Image (cartoon, rainbow, N blue to C red):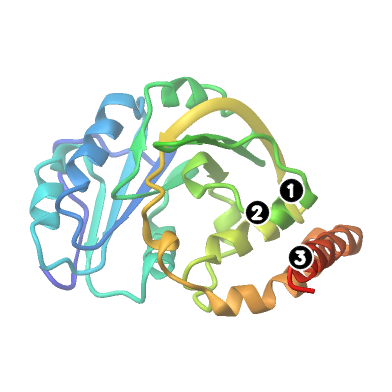
Amino acid sequence: MEGMIEALDLNQKDYVESYRLSIVIVTYNAETDITPCLQSIVDHGGGNLQLIIVDGGSTDETVNKVEAFGKYIDVLISEPDQGIYDAMNKSIKFLKGNWVLFLGADDRLLPTFASFVEQLVDKKSIYYGNCVSDSEVLGGAFTNYKLAKRNPCHQAIIYPSSVFSKYTYDLKYKVFADYLLNMQCWGDKTFRKEYLPVDISYYNMDGYSSYTADEAFRRDKPFLVRKYLGFLTYLRYRLKKFKEKKKVDSKFF
């Protein structure tokens, strides 16, 4: 399977020039997770949907399980990559949807997802909602300052595809390249940002970002906040960090 790039079942699935939504799933040795993920898309993804799978050259049964859903899949790539964000970048040239959602193999669409997609109307708007984990709901509306403090789940964000004519994921940041992309988008007045209070997906809190450090992003974050979210947001963010450090230091002196 290594090095495979193909469009699956275009004879079975009607080919269209443009879809309402592209869903990109990135996988690597995800045989235990990929079937429920794909089934949730079949059940809740709605119509006029392009489905793209970018696999990192799995050595288990992932690709075989993906191919079982062949009639729903437009593009399947299986080849070695440089990680999650390299895989996401690879998908960009295949996008035919007006909007795009990125998922991991251990994510699931929720039944309310279809109602969210029905509200996508402005092709210059980034629409985002909520993710549900085993312990909490992650979401709410984001200001520049809230974004400086934390990153929204990318599983709850639907970007207009035009975002990726302007930006790609920076592979320097192996965990938080999506955080940088969100800073760039929130600081870009070309794109509206609209929060819809809808639960979009189930998010696995034990995924890659929960056990992998990104020292490069941690080091660069203040600069990135200032560059993309503005000087006033940066000052407020730095003041918050100063107060947090002072509070921690006071416990030891």
- Density class for disc 3 (Cα within 10 Å; few <14, some 14-19, many ≥20) is many
Percent x, y of residue 15: 28, 39
Quarter occupied by residue 243: bottom right
Q: Are marks 2 and 1 in contact (CB under 8 Å)?
A: yes
Q: Residue furthest front?
A: 253
Q: Are marks 3 and 2 in contact (CB under 8 Å)?
A: no
Quadrant in which the C terminus is drawn: bottom right
| Residue matched to label 3 | 225
Q: Secondary structure at mark 3?
A: helix
Q: Secondary structure at mark 1?
A: helix
| Residue matched to label 2 | 150
In the displayed structure image, the side of residue 64 where residue 151 appears, left or right: right
In the displayed structure image, the side of residue 145 where residue 20 appears, left or right: left
Return the mark for residue 146: 1
Q: Which residue is found at the position 68% from the left and 34% from the top?
A: 194
Under mark 1, the amino acid is: Lys
Under mark 2, the amino acid is: Arg
Percent x, y of residue 67: 11, 48
